[in-house]
């Protein structure tokens, strides 16, 4: 019979460090008293933890709380210069690599176009590695101070010992991307689906902040979601939950890039919108200097004078409304956040999308949901990627060499703190 697991004093100390650090990172600057209240830790425990974290340079005092006559209280936040993280957005037309400090300020940036209609895994690895080297060189940081690299990719990410990417729409079949990258760099590598990294960024810092039940939508060439349920990211049995773009909107409809017919992505993905416009115009559109994004922008700006543009946007709004109504009926979220580069481009159509969703959703859940634009910009997927090594650092209590649980969203716990 196996022995029951036991919790040691060291385990409790690490758990308390982690709880305090999560609060300081997500809600700081905070006073010691606020940290204790939010993390459920006693004043003595907080005092001991903060003393150690200040000595180690993990947190820093950044000022004093305004006082009404009492002794001013020091304000604490995670020290931005304690280390650095790299966030990567592997898009279908470009690879963006950014270097962040722990305040998540961008310190260096590298963007490379893919140059091909379909990105090959080895090309992706080469561009990621070149981008990492570029941002480290630009900022002049010692590689030893890089805490990790977080990467958002298109497709499903299966978390085995090493992350394996299944990108059916882009021709990636069980690509061992994490192992391929580890053969080229000693930096810790963490990989997740791009919609999930976008969702993590919006949950921590953006339009989904403060929600326990939300769906963050990524609209681009591909279409996906990040589902937050009871404060945690919902992954499903194989981490493939949220593939909204491959739910069926029309039985026997248009053929999707994944090979199936009638997928939502075949109606609201950027390629599909541009192709439908060309079909209505009965000719191919001229090549735009801005590529696909430029073509979509031209459709949006031309809708008042071009009947084909007006019609394709009306169809896109209808299909998006029906798809969002499905999310509302299935997951009963408090908020649906619409992001991604296409989501930003059609942000002015959000009232129309809301009205279309109201026609297809059940009245009760729809009456309780907000449909809003994402707060974060073009680098939201890379920013979300950067949160992956930060989440690992915080979950480990910022103890060097110790990995926290594989956990991308975390709700601060409560209860007895045990020991300092």
Image (cartoon, rainbow, N blue to C red):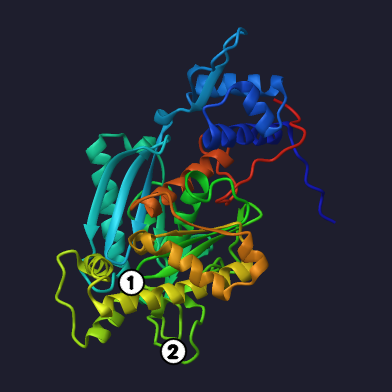
- Report the residue at 26% width, 58% height from top: 127
As helix, strand or loop, the secondary structure at mark 1 comes to: helix
- What is the CA distance from the residue labelled 1 to the residue labelled 2? 17 Å
Q: Residue 370 at x, y = what percent?
A: 55, 57
Report whether residue 62 is seen: yes
Q: Is residue 18 left or right of residue 257?
A: right
Residue that carries the numbered disc 2 in the rendered image = 253
Q: Residue 316 at x, y = what percent?
A: 39, 75
In the image, residue 27 above or below residue 125? above
Q: Nearer the viewer, residue 187 or 46?
A: 46
In the image, residue 322 above or below residue 26? below
- Report the residue at 27% width, 80% height from top: 308
Instruction: Give residue 254's quadrant in the image.
Output: bottom left
- Report the residue at 55% width, 51% height from top: 408
Instruction: Give residue 285's quadrant in the image.
Output: bottom left
Residue that carries the numbered disc 1 in the rendered image = 270
Q: Nearer the viewer, residue 16 or 266?
A: 266
Q: Is residue 303 left or right of residue 326?
A: left
Q: Residues within 10 Å of mark 2 (few under 14, many from 20)?
A: some
> Going by the picture, which residue comes out furthest to the bottom?
252
> Going by the picture, which residue comes out furthest to the right?
1
Image quarter hosting the C terminus: top right
Q: Residue 29 at x, y = what percent?
A: 52, 27
Q: Residue 2 at x, y = what percent?
A: 81, 54
As helix, strand or loop, the secondary structure at mark 2 comes to: loop
> Going by the picture, which residue comes out furthest to the front?
304
In the image, residue 104 above or below residue 310? above
Total label count?
Answer: 2
- Report the residue at 68% width, 29% height from top: 37
In the image, residue 247 above or below residue 327? below
Q: Upstream in the sequence, badge 1 or badge 2?
A: 2
């Amino acid at each position: 019979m196996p022995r029951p697991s036991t919790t040691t004093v060291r385990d409790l100390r690490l758990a308390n460090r982690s709880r305090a650090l999560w609060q300081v990172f997500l809600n700081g600057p905070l006073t010691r008293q606020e940290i204790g209240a939010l993390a459920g830790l006693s004043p003595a425990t907080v005092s001991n933890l903060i003393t150690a974290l200040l000595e180690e340079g993990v947190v820093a005092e950044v000022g004093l709380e305004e006082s009404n006559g009492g002794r001013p209280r020091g304000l604490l936040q995670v020290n931005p210069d304690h280390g650095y993280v790299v966030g990567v957005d592997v898009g279908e037309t470009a690879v963006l690599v950014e270097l962040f400090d722990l305040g998540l300020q961008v310190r260096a940036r590298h963007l490379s176009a893919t140059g091909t209609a379909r990105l090959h895994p080895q090309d992706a690895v080469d561009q990621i590695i070149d981008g990492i080297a570029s941002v480290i060189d630009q900022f002049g940081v010692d590689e030893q101070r890089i805490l990790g690299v977080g990467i958002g990719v298109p497709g499903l990410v299966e978390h085995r010992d090493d992350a394996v990417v299944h990108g059916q729409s882009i021709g990636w079949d069980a690509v061992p991307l994490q192992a391929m990258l580890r053969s080229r760099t000693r930096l810790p590598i963490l990989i997740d689906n791009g919609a999930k990294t976008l969702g993590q960024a919006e949950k921590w810092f953006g339009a989904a902040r403060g929600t326990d039940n939300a769906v963050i939508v990524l609209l681009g060439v591909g279409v996906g979601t990040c589902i937050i349920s009871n404060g945690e990211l919902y992954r499903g049995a194989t981490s493939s939950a949220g593939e909204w773009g491959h739910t069926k909107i029309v039985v026997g409809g248009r053929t999707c890039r994944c090979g199936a017919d009638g997928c939502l992505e075949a109606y609201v993905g950027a390629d599909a919108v541009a192709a439908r416009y060309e079909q209505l115009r009965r000719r191919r559109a001229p090549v735009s200097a801005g590529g696909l994004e430029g073509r979509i922008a031209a459709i949006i700006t031309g809708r008042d004078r071009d009947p084909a543009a007006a019609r394709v946007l009306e169809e896109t709004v209808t299909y998006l409304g029906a798809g969002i109504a499905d999310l509302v009926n299935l997951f009963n979220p408090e908020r649906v956040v619409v992001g991604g580069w296409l989501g930003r481009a059609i942000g002015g159509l959000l009232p129309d999308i809301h009205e279309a969703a109201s026609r297809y959703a059940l009245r009760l859940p729809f009456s309780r949901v907000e449909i809003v634009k994402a707060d974060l910009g073009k680098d939201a997927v890379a920013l979300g990627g950067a949160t992956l090594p930060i989440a690992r650092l915080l979950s480990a209590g910022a103890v060097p060499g110790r990995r926290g649980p594989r956990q991308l969203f975390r709700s601060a716990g409560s209860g007895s703190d045990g020991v300092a």
